[in-house]
Amino acid sequence: MFAVEDLSAAYGPVKALNGVTFTASRGQVTAVLGANGAGKTTLLRTVSGLVKSSKGSVTLNGKDITRTATEKLTSYGLSHVPEGRGVIAELTVTENLRLGGLHRATGSEPMPIERVFELFPRLGERREATAHMLSGGERQMLVIGRALMARPSVLLLDEPSLGLAPRVVAQIFDLLRGLVQTEELTVVLVEQNARSALSIADHGVVLNLGKVVASAPAAELAADEQLRHAYLGF
Ligand code: ATP
């Protein structure tokens, strides 16, 4: 479904990714975990072509998308929700969602907005609110909903829990879990909040200094005390 093979990237002399290999399956959440600076964001940015890879490949639905121009990737079914919950603050929730449907997977219609509101009822209640009025959790739902409008088969999510209260994180992660199943998505979830991410993930990949140090079913990683202490911070 989605495969990263021997992917490497650098910022000048800093080797941020060093031969990363993993696969992610349809209908599953694959959590990419690791400490600050482990290379998680760089991994997503390299997959999306925002950072140029120096080696390796990325395959999506059997198609090699390595070095495909970033703006073409939505047409292949890849959507990337970066860190920071960037929305157009002056537009309403509905207008922001519509923008997400403008460039979408080839041959598909945008997700009906009402479907987004079914998946995220809170967004439905706030549909006419301008985005700058939203709470952090609502904004996070909005950026995920906007990405879904493009009908992706693979959704890359960078640190959706950052700065949110634990109760809100639990709510977002629950929604994400449901979404993966009903929409048959492949989700690659980058998180520093390893405990919460592993609680909803099927599989986990742990990065350290740009390399994969563990890749296993989420429950197995969560049960590995040594690994948790060394790399996951819980
Ligand atoms: P965080 O959770 O803090 O974002 P991360 O695991 O996502 O960490 P990256 O942001 O991918 O890690 O950083 C990996 C390495 O690349 C780090 O050593 C970081 O300092 C370096 N790095 C990241 N972005 C740049 C950049 N634009 N220029 C130079 N070095 C960078």
Image (tube, rainbow, N blue to C red):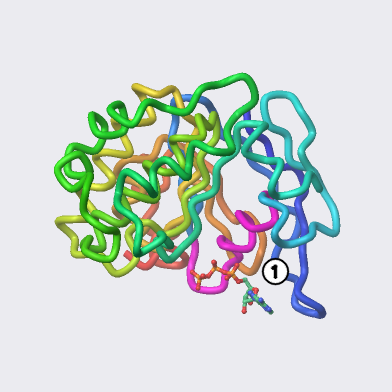
Task: Provide the residue span drawn in magenta.
Answer: 34-47
Residue 223 colored in magenta in the image: no
Residue 91 lies left or right of residue 124; in this view the side is right
Rendered-image quadrant of the C terminus = bottom left
- Residue 121, picture quadrant: top left
Q: Which residue is rendered at x = 26% and y = 38% of the image? A: 175
The percent coordinates of residue 40 (x first, y second) are 56, 61
Residue 39 colored in magenta in the image: yes
- Residue 79, picture quadrant: top right
- Exactly how many numbered labels are in the figure? 1
SS type, badge 1: strand
In which quadrant of this rendering is ligand 1 seen?
bottom right
The percent coordinates of residue 46 (x first, y second) are 70, 56
Q: Which residue is rendered at x = 37% and y = 56% of the image? A: 160
The percent coordinates of residue 223 (x first, y second) are 34, 47
Q: Which residue is rendered at x = 35% and y = 64% of the image? A: 89
Looking at the image, residue 217 lies above or below residue 39? above
Looking at the image, residue 174 lies above or below residue 119? below
Q: Nearer the viewer, residue 214 or 4?
A: 4
Q: Which residue is rendered at x = 51% and y = 35% of the image? A: 150
